[in-house]
Image: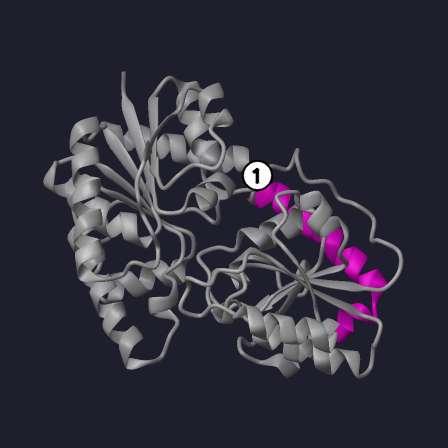
Amino acid sequence: MTTIAFIVNDSNFFITHRLNLAVACRIKGYRTIIVSPPWPDLTVLKKYQIEHVETDTVRERNSVISQMRLFFTYFSIVKAIRPDLVHLITAKPIILAGIAARILRIPVVAAVSGLGFAFIGRSLRTKILRWLVGKGYALSLNSDRNTVIFQNTSDRDLLLENGSIRWPALVLIPGSGVNLDQIDVRSEPTGSVVVLLPARLLGDKGVREFVEAARLVKTKHGDVVFRLQGKIDEQNPTAISLSELSDWVAEGVVEYEPFSSDPNEMFGSSHIVVLPSYREGFSKSLIDAAAAGRPVITSDVPGCRDAIIPGITGLLVPARDAHALAEATSALVENPALREQMGRAARRHAEKEFDIRIVTQIHLDIYERALEKT
């Protein structure tokens, strides 16, 4: 039986963004294995007979010793499983497990779902990290056996320009898709307009700009509700601290709610969705918002602008510009007819471009082509 192994360093990310691929592989008849940190609930995996190999991947351990230990963990797991193909997701598995797979001469499908903190920051430390990550990608990905999936052309072109990757077997897939059967288009809730930022609480998601824009909008529209909804990720270098969040809530400028796994509840209780991120791979929250029929305001940066039709399904603003964000937000707050028009267009756009069934089939086709190289 053909074996495909998925290797990822964040189980929750895999559940929300890639679990459909593992299920599709199992339905197709592949032996399917997920290699990841502890899995929160094995029910779905048992249902589809998907195997799980647990790794002790603690994200904040970034020392050279811990990375070497993780490399040998991946190497020993891949050597023991001997999969016909590995699908690597996020930077650390792509680099470390990718090098292991290259040594073991196993074909790789690598999903570059954004370039992350190293390619956003401007400090000397991030520039050094950017160089190291680029060299790591080159070591792991520059093989004729490998296929590299990008979610936007900017990330692809950046890695091409710095020599991290080569042209053969590069594929562009806009996002991880959305299950249109599970997300409803609901009428706007009654009462105050709710502006939602659904993201991890990180500085590079534009959270501080969102808060400053809220202050500006509230000087004119005091009853508008600004809601932060997402995971508090204190392990990330740009994390918003609990004390900073508490101060904002105490000030009354924003509300905070934890991440919800129910997109209908999260988007259905809002009027406008905002993501003022500095850079994304291809924002899943934006395509989920489109499926829910909500207008979007987002940054004119890779992975955000790609997810909307500017002026049709949402509005673009410059990154790191709270005043522009406030102006765009006020424009939609004041125009419910425009919100409704953009929301309808957003749903149509999601149906045409982001249907998870289409995205899944594209991946299955990629696996088949990659397996031909074995």
Q: Is residue 329 above or below residue 266?
A: below
Q: Nearer the viewer, residue 55 or 50?
A: 55
- The overriding secondary structure of the stretch rendered in magenta is helix
| Residue at (59, 76) in percent of width and height | 209
The spot of residue 298 in percent (x, y) is: 60, 66
Q: How many marks?
A: 1
| Residue at (58, 53) in percent of width and height | 285
| Residue at (62, 48) in percent of width and height | 288
Judged from this view, the residue extending furthest toward the left is 103
Observer able to see residue 62:
yes
Quadrant location, the C terminus: top left
Q: Is residue 54 left or right of residue 247?
A: left
Observer able to see residue 293:
no
Report if residue 228 lies within the magenta region.
Answer: no
Report if residue 352 lies within the magenta region.
Answer: yes
Q: Is residue 211 above or below residue 308?
A: below
What range is drawn magenta here?
330-353
The spot of residue 234 in percent (x, y) is: 46, 63
Q: Label 1 crowding class (10 Å Cα cut-off): few <14, some 14-19, many 20+?
A: many
The residue tagged 1 is: 355
Q: Nearer the viewer, residue 163 or 59?
A: 59
- In the rendered image, which quarter is residue 276 located in? bottom right
Q: Is residue 95 left or right of residue 190?
A: left
Q: Nearer the viewer, residue 59 or 188?
A: 59
Q: How is the image coloured?
A: one colour
The spot of residue 319 in percent (x, y) is: 53, 75
Q: Is residue 262 above or below residue 151?
A: above
| Residue at (61, 43) in percent of width and height | 261
Amino acid type at image mark 1:
Asp
- In the rendered image, which quarter is residue 323 located in? bottom right
- In the rendered image, which quarter is residue 197 located in? bottom right
Q: Secondary structure at mark 1?
A: loop
